Amino acid sequence: MIPLAYYIGLSAVLFTIGVVGVLTLRNAIVIFMSVELMLNSVNLSLIAFSAYSGNPAGQILVFFVIAVAAAESAVGLAIIIALFRNKLTVNIDEVNILKW
Amino acid sequence: MNLEQIAFLILAVAAIASAILMITRRNPVTSALFLVFNFFIIAVLYLFLRAQFIAVIQITVYAGAIMVLFLFVIMLLNLGDDKLLKWKLNSAKTISALLGIAFLVEISYFVMHFTSTAGMSPNAESMGTVESIGKVLYLGYLFPFEVTSILLLAAMVGAIFLAKKKFE
């Protein structure tokens, strides 16, 4: 039997790697991939809680999270393409026209 | 330590290693392939948790559809080596790494104090099948399910509009 804390610990470590990726990387596409990693780690902990408490609502929530992640990545990648057309870069340090 | 725990530990180490490799590679295509590997490992962990339907969805939607979209965009933009992606501030990298470590300490403090010894619920065995997920989804969550279709339509229209032409 695997204790529930193992799954929560793995999920926490993966989430932290995703946070570090978002903070340290400069490439907008790889930042998006780090966000996907964070979504996955949360999904893992939701499924683990669902299985250990015997409540199927967690799996339904993961289903909706996956659907929303699909929509989010489609729109996000379209924004990156539009950004690349206008600025010829995906480096987020050079995209500062909305900054004060 | 029994066989199931050893298998879990191997998978966990592989998941963490592929995630670290994903954020440290310079080439975005390599990063995307490591992320696909990570998604496959998480799908196997879903099978450990008896969530068969979600495991299949994970492989088809995440590793299949979403990551193919990412790879298409990477190849469409033809980024190559990221000489363009130099840091303006060298100190920013150190600061964000320190912030990440602080976040890990913070979150592991709560995980350490998580002392639940309960095993997997007995009805978890039959919970993750397509039949039982479908019953719960269509009987209890029909309205959110229908709203999701509108969300996907809006995302589709938005993606086509954003990627189609130049902004004036």
Image (spheres, rainbow, N blue to C red):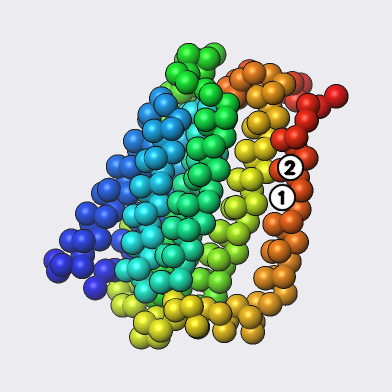
Q: Quadrant of residue A97?
A: top right
Residue A32 position, x and y percent, is 55, 39
Query: Identity of the amino acid at label 1?
Result: Met
Q: Nearer the viewer, residue B55 or A23?
A: B55
SS at circle 2: helix
In the rendered view, tell whether residue A40 sits above or below residue A1.
Answer: above
Residue B63 position, x and y percent, is 45, 51
Whether residue A9 is visible here, answered yes or no, is yes
Crowding at dot 2, Cα within 10 Å, few <14 / some 14-19 / many 20+, comes out as: few
Q: Quadrant of the C terminus of chain B?
A: top right
Residue B137 position, x and y percent, is 60, 78
Check contact, mark 1 vs mark 2: CB within 8 A: yes
The residue under the point 41% across, 43% down is B35
Chain to which mark 2 belongs: B
Chain to which mark 1 belongs: B
Q: Nearer the viewer, residue A55 or A78?
A: A78
Q: Give the numbered dot on residue B160.
A: 2
Residue B53 position, x and y percent, is 46, 71
The residue that mark 1 highlights is B156
The residue under the point 73% across, 66% down is B147
SS at circle 1: helix
Query: Identity of the amino acid at label 2?
Result: Ile
The residue under the point 68% across, 19% down is A87
